[in-house]
Each structure stands twice: as C-alpha cells, then as structure tokens.
Image (tube, rainbow, N blue to C red):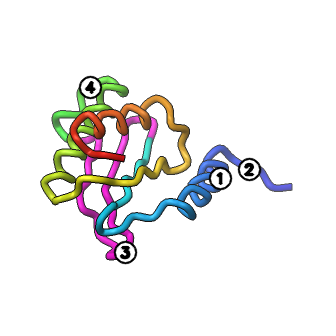
Amino acid sequence: MSVVTKERRRLKRRRRVRAKVVGTSERPRVSVFRSNRGVFAQVVDDQRGHTVASVQWTEADLRELKPLEQARRAGALLAERARAAGVQSVVFDRGGYQYHGRVKALAEGAREAGLSF
C-alpha cells in the first residue's frame, strides 16, 4: 500500500491545472510557488521557454512583511516587472494550491498593479 502525501496530492492537482493552462508570448503564465516561509512567482512564456519576470519573498523589501501583505506586495512587484517587459495580460497558474490566502493575495496585488488575468 502506498502512502499519498499532501505534496503528492498537490503535484497531481498541479499537473491537472498545467494540462489546461499554457503561457504564450502574447499572454504568458504566472506560476506561483508557496512555501511555509514565503511565495515565489514568475511570468513564463512557455512557447519560448523563457522567464519574463520573477519575484521572490527573500527580496529586501518583502522579507520583513507579514505573509498576506508580503504576497500582495510580491504580486504588485511582479506586475511592475512584467509591464516593464511589455506584458499586459497573463494567465494564472495557481500551481495546485487553493485560490485562497497568499495565492489569492498575490493575484489581487498583481491585478491592482495593472496586470490583467
């Protein structure tokens, strides 16, 4: 009998989401990874296999914030960097996580900063 861990269930959901969500040059994918300590996000053009913009919680202006505020600010930073790279519209890949809490805060922060989902 095999043990299905929490991480294995998340990876199964992640594969299911990724089968439907693909980033293009016109509309790249925002990929989210949430750890116990913070959030990482990147805007990815899957056709070219390039990362257009990224943000991580270890950056100086994000490190000292509380988790939800950190995620919201990370989303805003990601949106600023993506817009500087010429990206206006993206698709959101929640990475198998529930659209709740820090994942939702990151998406809302990016929307407020002008990135359209």
Where residue 67 sits: x, y (%)? 36, 27
Q: Earlier in the sequence, mark 3 or mark 2?
A: 2
Task: Indicate the secondary structure of the residue bearing disc 4.
Answer: loop
Give the residue type at disc 3. Answer: Gln
Q: Earlier in the sequence, mark 4 or mark 1?
A: 1
Q: Which mark is residue 47?
A: 3
| Magenta stretch in the rendered image | 35-58
Residue indicated by mark 2: 4
Residue drawn 34% across the image and 49% down it: 41
Callout 3 crowding tier (Cα within 10 Å): few <14, some 14–19, many ≥20: few
Q: Is residue 67 above or below residue 7?
A: above
Callout 1 crowding tier (Cα within 10 Å): few <14, some 14–19, many ≥20: few
Q: Earlier in the sequence, mark 3 or mark 1?
A: 1
Q: Earlier in the sequence, mark 3 or mark 4?
A: 3
Q: Quadrant of the rendered structure where residue 11 is? A: bottom right
Task: Indicate the secondary structure of the residue bearing disc 1.
Answer: helix
Q: Earlier in the sequence, mark 4 or mark 2?
A: 2
Residue drawn 32% across the image and 23% down it: 66
Where residue 92 sits: x, y (%)? 42, 50
Residue indicated by mark 4: 65
Q: Image check: 89 left or right of 91? A: left
Residue indicated by mark 1: 8
Residue drawn 38% across the image and 58% down it: 29
Residue drawn 23% across the image and 34% down it: 62
Q: Image check: 10 left or right of 54? A: right
